[in-house]
Amino acid sequence: QVHLVESGGGLVQAGGSLRLSCAASGLFFAINAMGWYRQAPGKERELVATITSGGNTNYGDSVKGRFTVSRDNAKNTVFLQMNSLKPEDTAVYYCNAVARRTIMSTPTNYWGLGTQVTVSS
């Protein structure tokens, strides 16, 4: 089982910045990709950014150029630096990890409980 704990959410004015962190713990063989998704009220969960253990990144179109995802593999932690925040970035941000419990296991998605980000206009 992989346990993900997010931190760093909060309230910020438009144009401001926030930094989210997510630490993975538990018993697992390896974590492949880690990243962030978000869900606004009345909307589906959407990709924000992901990063592989090798450092390859993928961003949702709406955050490209403003958000940066990074990772500390030694600490099994992923970060999301959010700059130039807009009111439409308001959502619950969920940490995601794709991990294998054993060397023979298939990769499985794990989710954190989410952290609220609110951007005021």
Image (cartoon, helix red, strand yellow):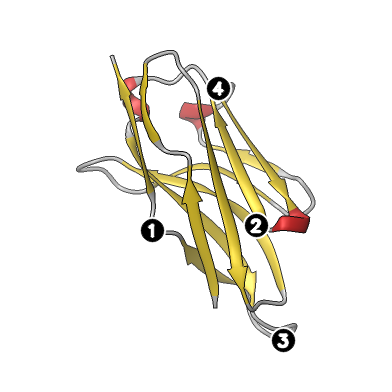
Amino acid carrying label 2: it is Ala
Q: Secondary structure at mark 3?
A: loop
Residue at 72%, 77% in the rendered image: 29
Q: Which mark is residue 66?
A: 4
Residue at image mark 2: 33
From the viewer's side, name the closer residue of 4 and 97.
4
Q: Position of residue 115 (x, y in %)?
A: 39, 46
For the residues bearing labels 3 and 4, Cβ distance under 8 angstroms: no
Tell which tag, 1 or 4, sits nearer the viewer.
1
Identify whether 7 is placed above or below 99.
above
Residue at image mark 3: 104
The CA span between labels 1 and 3 is: 27 Å
The CA span between labels 1 and 4 is: 24 Å
In the picture, the quarter occupied by the N terminus is bottom right
The CA span between labels 2 and 1 is: 18 Å
Q: Earlier in the sequence, mark 2 or mark 1?
A: 2
Q: Position of residue 2 (x, y in %)?
A: 56, 72
Tell which tag, 1 or 3, sits nearer the viewer.
1
Q: Position of residue 96 (x, y in %)?
A: 52, 57
Q: Secondary structure at mark 4?
A: loop
Q: Earlier in the sequence, mark 3 or mark 4?
A: 4
Residue at image mark 1: 113
Q: Secondary structure at mark 2?
A: strand
The CA span between labels 3 and 4 is: 38 Å
Q: Position of residue 42 (x, y in %)?
A: 20, 43
- Residue 32 sits in quarter: bottom right
Q: Earlier in the sequence, mark 1 or mark 4?
A: 4
Label 1: few (<14), some (14–19) or many (≥20) C-alpha neighbours in 10 Å = few
Identify whether 109 is placed above or below 85.
below
Amino acid carrying label 4: it is Arg
